[in-house]
Amino acid sequence: MQATKHDPVGEDIFDADIAAYEKLREELERTHMDQFALFFEGKFVGVYPDFDTAGRTALSLSKKGPFFIQQIGSPIGLDPDSAMHLHLRHR
């Protein structure tokens, strides 16, 4: 079994992304229900009609990530089809 490397910087960014989403949650749910919100480095990037478009936009920002893509109106991280956390590392 291979040990995973602890990444406190990535965790801090992920926490900042979630905090940014929570701050905007009510407005996003009012205006963009079921679409996908993208956050990068603790900042709101935009809303996209589907996960693939949000993912392509995320990769255009940085090949490394981490990114936070959340389907608006879905519980955070409980449904892999509607909430996805991308932690991409450039190899």
Image (cartoon, helix red, strand yellow):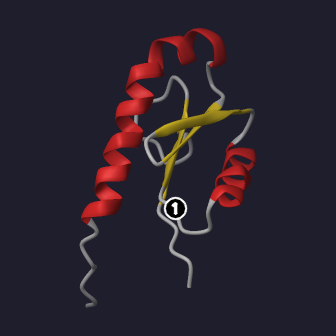
Confirm whether residue 16 shows in the render.
yes
Residue at the disc numbered 1: 65
Give SS at disc 1: loop
For the N terminus, the quadrant is bottom left
Residue 46, percent across and down? 65, 33
Residue 8, horizontal then vertical, whole percent: 25, 63
Q: Residue at coordinates 51% horizontally, 23% vertically from top-left?
A: 73
Q: Is residue 52 above or below residue 76?
A: below
Whether residue 75 is visible to the viewer of this picture, yes or no, is no
Judge from the rendering whether residue 49 lies leftward or rightward of residue 14; answer left or right: right
Residue 28 x/y as whole percent: 56, 18
Residue sitting nearer the eye, 40 or 82: 40
Report crowding for label 1: few under 14, some 14 to 19, many 20 or more residues within 10 A (C-alpha): many
Counting from the top left corner in percent of width and height, residue 54 is at 68, 45
Residue type, mark 1 in image: Gly
What residue occupies the far top of the structure in this picture? 30
Q: Does residue 9 sit above or below 38 in this rendering?
A: below
